[in-house]
Image: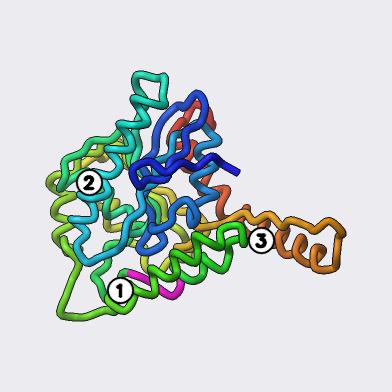
Amino acid sequence: MANWQEIFGNWVLVPSNPRGAIHFLGGAFVAAVPQVSYRCLLEDLADEGYVVIATPFVNTLDHGVIAQDVLASFERAWEYVRTRMLRSAYLPLYGMGHSMGCKLHLLIGSQLGQERDGNILMAYNNYPLRKAVPLGEEVYQFTNQLSTQFATQITQFTEQFAQLAPGMKPNLDVEFTPSPEATNQLVEAQYRVKRNLLLKFTTDTIDQTRPLHDILRVRYPEMTSVQILKGTHLTPLSQDLKWQAGESFSPLDAIGQMVNQTMKQTVNRDFYPLRKAILRWLDPVAYI
């Protein structure tokens, strides 16, 4: 198991001899437990030498306030990691977001004026409230994939979601702040992160990568790239489960290992091309 540490409310992985750092923000309610919901992706990045700081957040209608809060939380953790845990005087710092997490990174880079060495934006979602959050799919489907070793975290998460979900039912009289239109205007005028990787999945009905690419290629035409990968909106949530057989191998163990192998094949098909695309962009020379 990876050595996750909680630092000022952030979930942190610090590899030996790091080559860079990643600030991760997840999508909608799954961001409440990023060390669980995005475990495979984040632990793989740490294994490749990247410090991972995943900032949890609770979804509300005011995305501007959420962006301020996650930035403040991240900066406290990053200062602690840099001064107390790292030997390197400088590490490149990247933002990485999935779905709503992409919007928060865009707000951090525009409304809040933060510069990063680059941003990785997966399955960007900037729809209005009535279309933005596929609650049943994004929340419940990923929990069904997780192993029992995370039962406590999942129980805490689902209890929190059950309390929050009723308040998030679409209401045509309310909208996110900033609105989708205002977000686009902020990015067009103020976004300060020059190097960007946009990742779109082939089967994703709520993705808005193309409109974002249209904006960024005007602002930073030589530093913005887009890749289309096989997968769905849930691909970054993929989990590599490990079935633990009992002391005496039973028919149930045989079935468990068979299911585990099937799931691994599914994960490998879509997840590992995503992993490869991210690592190649982070270090093109090492992953030719």
What residue range appears in magenta? 133-137
- Could you tell me how far apart the alpha carbons at marks 3 and 1 are, in whole angstroms? 30 Å
Badge 1 crowding class, 10 Å Cα cut-off, few under 14, some 14 to 19, many 20 or more, is few
Q: Considering the numbered disc 3 on the image, is that residue within a helix, a strand or a loop?
A: helix
Q: In x, y percent, where is residue 13?
A: 47, 38
Looking at the rendered structure, which numbered label has been put on residue 131?
1
Q: Amino acid at mark 3?
A: Met
Q: Considering the numbered disc 1 on the image, is that residue within a helix, a strand or a loop?
A: helix
The answer to which of marks 3 and 1 sits earlier in the sequence is 1
In the image, 151 versus 98, the foreground residue is 151
Q: Amino acid at mark 2?
A: Ile
- Could you tell me how far apart the alpha carbons at marks 3 and 2 are, in whole angstroms? 36 Å
Q: Which residue is mark 2?
A: 108
Callout 3 touching callout 1 (CB < 8 Å): no
Q: Is residue 156 left or right of residue 262?
A: left
Above-or-below relation of 286 to 6: above
Badge 3 crowding class, 10 Å Cα cut-off, few under 14, some 14 to 19, many 20 or more, is some
- Regarding residue 225, the answer to whether it shows in the image is no
Determine the residue positioned at 23% across, 35% down. Answer: 115
Q: Amino acid at mark 1?
A: Lys
Q: In x, y percent, where is residue 35?
A: 47, 51
